[in-house]
Image (cartoon, rainbow, N blue to C red):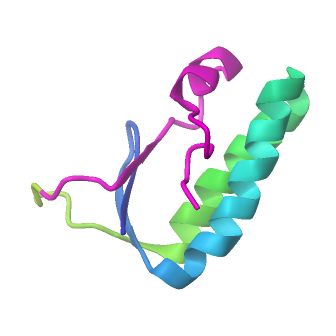
Amino acid sequence: MIIRILGEGQYDVADHALDRLNELDSALEAAVEAGDEAAFAASLSELLDGVRTAGIAHPADSLDESDLILPPGDATIDQVREMLNDEGLIPG
């Protein structure tokens, strides 16, 4: 799966890593729903770090389409709220 972090690049992430990323995504979603800015900032950072750790940088010159798009690390809670769907940012 190719996951793009806006403003940063794409990462190739193996399917087996998605369970952990979904846990991090759930924590982020809960922080957004609660309007908890501190928990939101920590959760967003953990999710993006999780993608960076689990993934391998996708070649920058590749034109491959991203399967998922995540907000940048400096996104606001309102920006992330707009990106959320029924399954959070990462389906599954």
In the rendered image, the vertical position of residue 36 relative to residue 5, given as above or below:
above
Q: Going by the image, does 13 lie left or right of 78? A: left
Q: Is residue 82 magenta?
A: yes
Seen at 59% across and 52% down, the residue is 48
Magenta highlight: main SS: loop
Give the answer, above or below, for where 29 lies relative to 37: below
- Residue located at (62% from left, 43% from top): 88
Residue found at the far top of this picture: 78
**Placement of the N terminus among the 4 image quadrants:** bottom left
- Split into 4 quadrants, where in the image is the C terminus? bottom right
Magenta stretch: residue 38 in it? no
Q: Which residues are magenta?
A: 64-92
Picture coordinates of residue 87, whole percent (x, y)? 61, 46
**Which is more toward the observer, 10 or 67?**
67
Report the side of 36 relative to 40 (left or right). right
In the displayed structure, 40 sits above or below 43; it is above
What's the residue at 39%, 45% (across, down)?
A: 8
Residue at 69 percent of width and 51 percent of height: 25
Residue 49, x across and y down, in percent: 63, 59
Q: Is residue 35 left or right of residue 16?
A: right
Tell me the quarter of the picture where residue 24 sits. Answer: bottom right
**x, y percentage for residue 51?**
54, 63
The part of the image, by quadrant, that contains residue 76 is: top right
x and y percentages locating residue 45 in the rendered image: 69, 46
* Farthest residue, direction bottom: 16
